[in-house]
């Protein structure tokens, strides 16, 4: 039996952001940035219009999500290594204060965790239409040829 999947990757589903990640359990890389590219896929049955999901809706929602990250400093609020503290309109991140940041409820600002966070945001934004999907997949490319993919399969998609 066949299946259907749509995929969106546009020039406007990109964002530039700064971050730093921890690794090897005790090291922390220097603050730096990437020009991220985001793509999303949704699998599922066709609706009454023979769509898995309307491209227009997924493009609009994906752009809204990545626009929230564009030209920001991304900090993980669930890290057990990086201390992040909000102080009014400023944020303290372990060693120095930063402005213009996005606090993300993730353990590290890796491409993998960004892909998962974007997928969950997209699923929330698409609401009822996302409930029919049998899978949602988001790719985050942080440098040319270097990307992470988060895929959520759902065995009991609701029609």
Image (tube, rainbow, N blue to C red):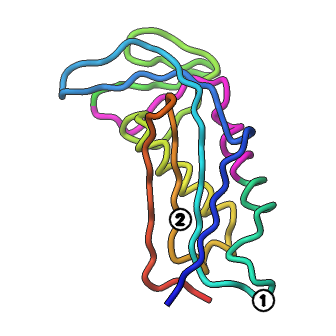
* Magenta residue check for 68: yes
Q: Which quadrant of the view contains residue 70?
A: top right
Magenta range is 62-80
Structural crowding at the residue carrying mark 1, measured as other residues with C-alpha within 10 Å and reported as few (<14), some (14–19) or many (≥20): few
Structural crowding at the residue carrying mark 2, measured as other residues with C-alpha within 10 Å and reported as few (<14), some (14–19) or many (≥20): many
Point out the tag, 1 or 2, that comes first from the N-terminus: 1
Which residue: 66% across, 23% down? Answer: 71
- Residue placed under numbered mark 1 in the picture: 48
| Callout 1: SS | loop
- The x, y position of residue 46, in whole percent, is 68, 84
Q: Choose between 82 and 72: the one closer to the eye.
A: 72
Q: Which quadrant of the view contains residue 66?
A: top right
Residue 94 seen in the current view: yes
Quadrant holding the C terminus: bottom right
* 2 with respect to 99 (left or right): left
Mark number displayed over residue 76? none
- Residue placed under numbered mark 2 in the picture: 136
Up/down of 136 relative to 62, above or below = below
Dots 1 and 2: beta carbons under 8 Å? no
* 69 with respect to 75 (left or right): right
Residue 128 seen in the current view: no
Which residue: 58% across, 61% down? Answer: 41
Question: Alpha carbon of mark 1 to alpha carbon of mark 2: how far?
Answer: 20 Å
Up/down of 132 relative to 94, above or below = below
Up/down of 81 relative to 4, above or below = above
- The x, y position of residue 126, in whole percent, is 69, 65
């Amino acid at each position: 039996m066949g299946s259907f999947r749509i995929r969106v990757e546009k020039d406007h589903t990109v964002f530039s952001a700064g971050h730093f990640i921890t690794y090897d359990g005790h090291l922390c890389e220097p603050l730096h940035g990437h020009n991220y590219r985001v793509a999303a896929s949704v699998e599922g049955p066709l609706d009454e219009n023979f769509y898995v999901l309307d491209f227009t809706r997924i493009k609009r929602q994906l752009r809204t999500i990545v626009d929230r990250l564009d030209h920001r400093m991304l900090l993980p609020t669930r890290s057990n290594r990086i201390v992040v503290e909000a102080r009014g309109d400023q944020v303290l991140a372990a060693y120095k204060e930063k402005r213009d940041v996005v606090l993300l409820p993730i353990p590290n600002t890796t491409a993998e965790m960004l892909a998962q966070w974007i997928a969950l945001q997209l699923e929330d934004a698409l609401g009822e239409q996302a409930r029919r999907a049998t899978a949602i997949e988001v790719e985050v490319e942080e440098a040319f040829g270097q990307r992470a993919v988060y895929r959520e399969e759902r065995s009991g998609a609701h029609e």
